[in-house]
Image (cartoon, grey):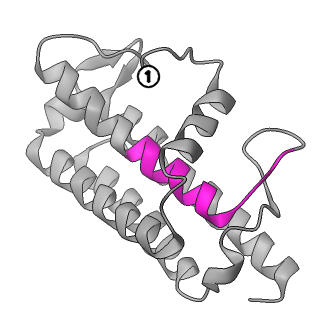
Amino acid sequence: MVPKNKDELVQEITSAYEKLKVEFENIPENLSTEKTMEGQLKDTKMSVCNLLAYLVGWGNLVLKWDKVYQSGKMPDLPDTGFKMNEMGRLAEKFYQDYADDNFVSLVKKYNEVVTKIFDLIDSKSNKELYETPWYKKYPFGRMIQFNTSSPYKNARARIRKWKKEKGIL
């Protein structure tokens, strides 16, 4: 479902987040750093920790976008020094940014960034989220959804496939 308003956005993120959060609960920490999961780029492998770093990285970018936008500027999208066609390079940056974090720390950071995103959404009116152009034809609510519930669903599918291969399901 593509949310069309603030309430639907919160519902969509909540649903995807709750389902993904459950998947992290029974992952053995010793398997969390094995690069055996299908990667973000074709023919690459990543770890559960890499996937968490990716989700935390994108969450923090959404928060950064809002902070820059609130200062009267349009943020660099997707991030300073990156073009929209360089998502693989951006994913690698996120892996590096959180390389010193272990699985437990990354799960905590993931939960924290999702809470901050909910707080951000709560601080916005429906008009700010869905009735005002923000980036090209997309309102800010859609940009939030592109970088929260959509990747959460994708991450859950990857983790479930990986768990099945590992005999964890």
Classify the position of the C terminus by image quarter. Answer: bottom right
Asked if residue 6 lies left or right of residue 35, the reply is left
Q: Residue at x 37, y 35 (%)?
A: 61
Q: Residue at x 58, y 31 (%)?
A: 90
Q: Residue at x 83, y 82 (%)?
A: 166
In this rendering, the count of numbered labels is 1
* Depicted 37 relative to depicted 67: above or below: below
Q: Main secondary structure of the magenta part?
A: helix
Give x and y (percent) for residue 79.
Answer: 43, 22
Q: Nearer the viewer, residue 132 or 161?
A: 161
- Mark 1 lies on a secondary structure that is loop
Residue type at mark 1: give it.
Asp
Give x and y (percent) for residue 60.
Answer: 34, 43
Location of residue 131 (image quadrant): top left
Please give the range of residues in magenta: 44-59
* Depicted 125 relative to depicted 84: above or below: below
User: In the image, is residue 134 part of the stretch drawn in magenta?
Assistant: no
List the residue tagged with mark 1.
Answer: 79
Give x and y (percent) for residue 20.
Answer: 52, 71
Give x and y (percent) for residue 121.
Answer: 20, 47
* Depicted 101 relative to depicted 162: above or below: above
Q: Residue at x 18, y 29 (%)?
A: 67
Location of residue 87 (image quadrant): top right
Q: Nearer the viewer, residue 57 or 22?
A: 57
